[in-house]
Amino acid sequence: MTGRIESRRIIIIPIIGLALLTLSLAAILAWNAYTKRVEGQRLLRVNGMADKIIKAASILAVERGLTSAALGAGTTTPDIKRELVKLRARSDALWKEINITARALANELSAGHAFSFLFERNAHAYRTLQEARRRVDAGLATRRGAISRAEWMKVSIRHIATAARLREAAFAGWAGVHEVAQLNITLKHRIWLVSEYAGMERGTLVYFVAARRPVPAEVVDELKSLRGVVLRNVEDILSLKQLPGSNAKILRAIEGMERNFLGPFDTTRAQIYAAVDSGNYPLTAEQWWSQATSAVESILGVVAAVTEIVEKAPRGWLSATSNCLFYILLFLAPRWWLRS
């Protein structure tokens, strides 16, 4: 009898040990799947916020240019007034959404994190922009020039720049899949630089074209510097065409940018620059604005292609981890039921 009990113990102990080991492994897998899922959800939130910042910046760049044209002409039309109201409303709506995500992220991070500091700094830049908008409206209404072109450009550029630093800080030190953060920090940032600096050139020139005035030599030098930044980053973006394994969708978007931004638009730019000394521009402000805006939008088309690729990884994690958690629960449920 004693021998039978001992035999049972010898058989049961390894079974219990194996069961405990299985449960432990299941718990580890479940925890890993859960943390991976949380990471994927957070990455999608941050990536969505980053794309909204780029979109908001592109809208403000259009507002910046239209306002610059109005300041150059010394007046504005009812159509431009309506367009400015729409642009501001779209920009403000996006910033409400951005701030919800950014505030939540700032609360998740440590108090001394760069993101929290930049979040407050960007809020200050946004308030300064709102004040500049009020001065623009007052100046155009009274035709007394309440704000200069240079000051308006400076304020709007500062807000876009602080927003860009906030976007970069959201991905800095990311512990997840490096490819996702890397595409945001490198490729998306280069695309943003090209669109922003091309937009600054667009907004500066439209002021002088609208005013039918020559561009001062110091402003021409500034424009040359802007173009230098554009061309350096365009070169980096185009280099992707030579890299094996580059995503086909991104390459198609880059080719579209190359055709538009570096094609017919270069001829338009050359015509405008040929007249900067005389002020006798071959295009109206509306014509220059339309062609320059079309070129800038072709740059932003690359962002949409990158976003689609970037979001595949975290969405894949969410799908895989959901399946993993389901099967682990399916495995553990009968054992919990039998135990009860």
Image (cartoon, grey):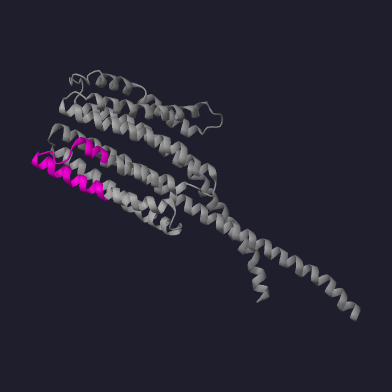
The residue shown at (57%, 52%) is 320
Toward the bottom, the furthest residue is 1
- Going by the image, does 150 lie left or right of 54? left
- Going by the image, does 97 lie left or right of 23? left
Where residue 136 appears, x then y in whole percent?
A: 17, 42
How many discs appear? 0
Where residue 95 appears, x then y in whole percent?
A: 32, 50
Type of secondary structure dominating the magenta stretch: helix
Q: Does 77 sit above or below residue 173?
A: above
Q: Does 10 sit above or below residue 41?
A: below
The residue shown at (32%, 39%) is 58
Q: Which residues are magenta?
A: 127-154
Q: Is residue 145 magenta?
A: yes
Where residue 51 appears, x then y in whole percent?
A: 39, 44
Q: Does 113 sit above or below residue 249?
A: below
Q: Is residue 131 magenta?
A: yes
Toward the left, the furthest residue is 142
The residue shown at (75%, 65%) is 18
Q: Quadrant of the N terminus?
A: bottom right
Q: Does 70 sit above or below residue 56?
A: above
Where residue 115 appears, x then y in whole percent?
A: 42, 51
Residue 295's image quarter? top left
